[in-house]
Amino acid sequence: MWISRSILLKSLLHQRCYSQSVAAAAVAFEHSFEQAPLTYLEGFPRPDPKYDETILAIPRDGSGKNISGKERKQGRVPAILFEQEDGQHGGNKRLISVRANQIRKLVNHLGRSFFLSRLFDLEVAPEFGSDEVIEKIRVLPRAIHLHSGTDAPLNVTFIRAPSHALLKVDVPLVYRGEDVCPGLRKGSSLNTIRRTVKYLCPADVIPPYIDVDLSELDVGQKLTMADLKVHPALKLLKSKDEPVCKHHIPPKRKNSGSPKIGKADVMVKEACDQNGNNLALNLLATLNDCNSPIGSNVLIHHIGESSTCSVSWRPQNTT
């Protein structure tokens, strides 16, 4: 059978283009599976296994103020489990309840910000203590609402965190090196601007915190978000030029003359030491020897034959 050259050429070109696209897709698909899973790098903070814990939960029938109140009276905290970042828009939402004492213990041990930047295993069972497991998955606490007076957990929001998930996390900052900070040693004060920084993190390498090194920060200098050392897979969701902390010199106080000191501000009620020396007279002599401006404002009071005395500052004449 004879086939025209143009038809044959068109079919070959079509087959060639289709084959190239399929090949490219196949290569990309293969590379995605060959890519090694992300892990924490040496020198960067990683979660402390001491606080590894499985959060136990049971299904919750409904939502609302009355149902949530009943859950809290029974020692449970109403919670919601979402599907990744768009879960609040209807993706695989599950109503659950968790144990209040377990959540409170984790928040107290870790701190609220550190609790919200750590992954946990969540195990959903029909009832607490049941051996049957409905669902077991790794989750990230997205939000927690605490009572303003007692810090008791009122509700918790969890988000599923499989390995392929990219999650927005407010990572807490830990400031280190204050004892050797040049700026602090020169008398400046540290203005802490940010306590957390938001990153888009792969679920496998969510940092529990970020170290902020102050050991080389001098007077007038500042650290920005670009100076933070994090895993290269993390993506900053704020401007890298935003400051995290900075040093500034506090303004000098103007000397408005002698301070106004009340009579009851300083009082010494011991008459003498073990050697029989009058403490009040010794104090007055010391102040006079040092040319103290308040030395002349010390009153010595002798009470009775016991030589008991008191020392007080004489109020300044402000007129």
Image (cartoon, helix red, strand yellow):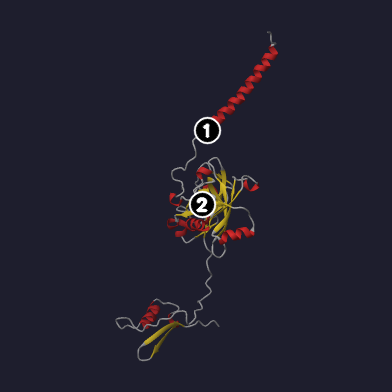
Residue extending furthest toward the top: 1
Q: Does residue 222 appear anywhere in the picture?
A: no
Q: Amino acid at mark 2?
A: Leu
Identify whether 146 is placed above or below 233.
below
Upstream in sequence: badge 2 or badge 1: 1
Q: Quadrant of residue 27?
A: top right
| Disc 1: which residue | 33
Residue 56: mark in rendering: 2
Taking the spot 46% from the left edge, 59% from the top edge, the residue there is: 184
Amino acid type of disc 1? Phe
Residue 262 in the image: x percent, y percent?
A: 49, 81
Depth order, front residue of 303/24: 24
Give the image location of residue 56, x and y in percent: 51, 51
- What's the distance in space between the residues labelled 2 and 1, CA to CA? 32 Å
Disc 1 packing (10 Å; few <14; some 14–19; many ≥20):
few
Residue found at x 56% / y 42%:
165
Residues marked 2 and 1 touching at CB (< 8 Å): no
